[in-house]
Amino acid sequence: MTSSSTPQRFALAGLLTLAVIPSLAGVFRLTELVGGADITPENTRFFASPAPVVVHILAAVPFGVLGAFQFVPAIRRRHPGRHRAAGRFLVVCGLAAALSGLWMTLLYPRTDSDGDLLTGIRLVFGLAMAASLVLAFAAVRRRDLARHRAWMFRGYAIGMGAGTQTLLFIPSIVALGLPGELDKALVHGLGWVINLAVAEWAIHRRPSAAAHKPEDVDRITTE
């Protein structure tokens, strides 16, 4: 890596932290389902219909962990073929995670702390994540790397919302106790808004597409 490697490593560590937090929760949920844990009011819906939550976890974990490395410029330049192959895989994983999340939002029974506001927020951001990934894929097919990266930043930021939400919930629960219906909805929404704000900052501080040499575009987009 170049002299910019230290900021890149910090950024990668931050992204991996956001990815690992929900990944651990997902692995725990899979262990419950496979191991036949005691059924409680909190997990009964997962046992009654395990397919969407299993798809969601199996797709979201690689999307979060592997996806973090896609945003490291040094890795992307050094291994464009791997970046391209991983990108295709991650678009599929991201779409599976977004669509299974929408599936759970619409079809799973709500818990006592889930209300109409939280349901609406989840639907908006789930659809936004899916749309971002589709637009990112369409952009790279046109060799428009600037728009491709911008939409991938947005899709990944939404996908990592669970990590930011967990970090927000911890001090909130310590200070105020378990959140009510409105508090839970607002914290979820705030987590996604924070991630998207950081993504937009990262997008607009990056060099424009004109700064990319034609051969760089070919290396990343060549079939």
Image: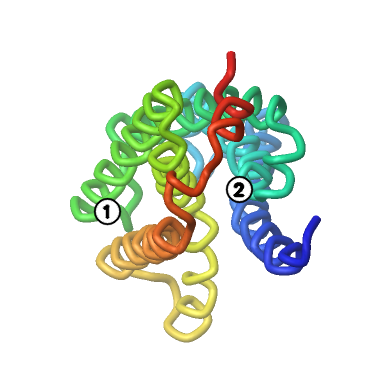
Identify which residue, 166 or 70, lies in the foreground: 70
Under circle 1, the secondary element is: helix
Q: Is residue 143 left or right of residue 118?
A: right
Outermost residue to the bottom: 175
Q: Nearer the viewer, residue 93 or 29?
A: 93
| Amino acid type of the residue that numbered disc 1 sits on in the rendered structure | Leu
Q: Nearest the camera: 162 or 30?
A: 162
Left or right of 61 in this view: 50 = left
Left or right: residue 143 versus residue 22 is left
Say which quarter of the image contains residue 132. top left
Residue 91, given in percent of the width and then of the height, sits at 50, 28
In this view, the mark in front (2 or 1): 2
Nearest the viewer among 102 and 139 is 139
Q: Say whether disc 2 or disc 1 marks the residue closer to the N-terminus.
A: 2
| Category of crowding for the residue at label 2, using alpha-carbon neighbours closer than 10 angstroms: few (below 14), some (14–19), many (at least 20) | some
Q: Residue at x 45, y 63 (%)?
A: 205
Seen at 68% across and 45% down, the residue is 69
Q: Are marks 2 and 1 in contact (CB under 8 Å)?
A: no
Q: Position of residue 63 (x, y in %)?
A: 59, 37
Left or right: where does residue 31 sit relative to residue 210? right
SS type, badge 2: loop
**Mark 1: few/some/many CA within 10 Å (<14, 14-19, 20+):** many
Distance CA(mark 2)–CA(mark 1): 30 Å
Residue at (48% x, 37% y) in the render: 44
- Disc 2 marks which residue? 71
Residue on which the image places disc 1: 118
User: In which quadrant of the rendered image does the N terminus lie?
Assistant: bottom right
**Residue 12: which quarter of the image?**
bottom right
* The C terminus, quarter of image: top right
Residue 183, image x, y percentages: 31, 70
Viewer can see residue 54: no
Q: Position of residue 58 (x, y in %)?
A: 61, 30
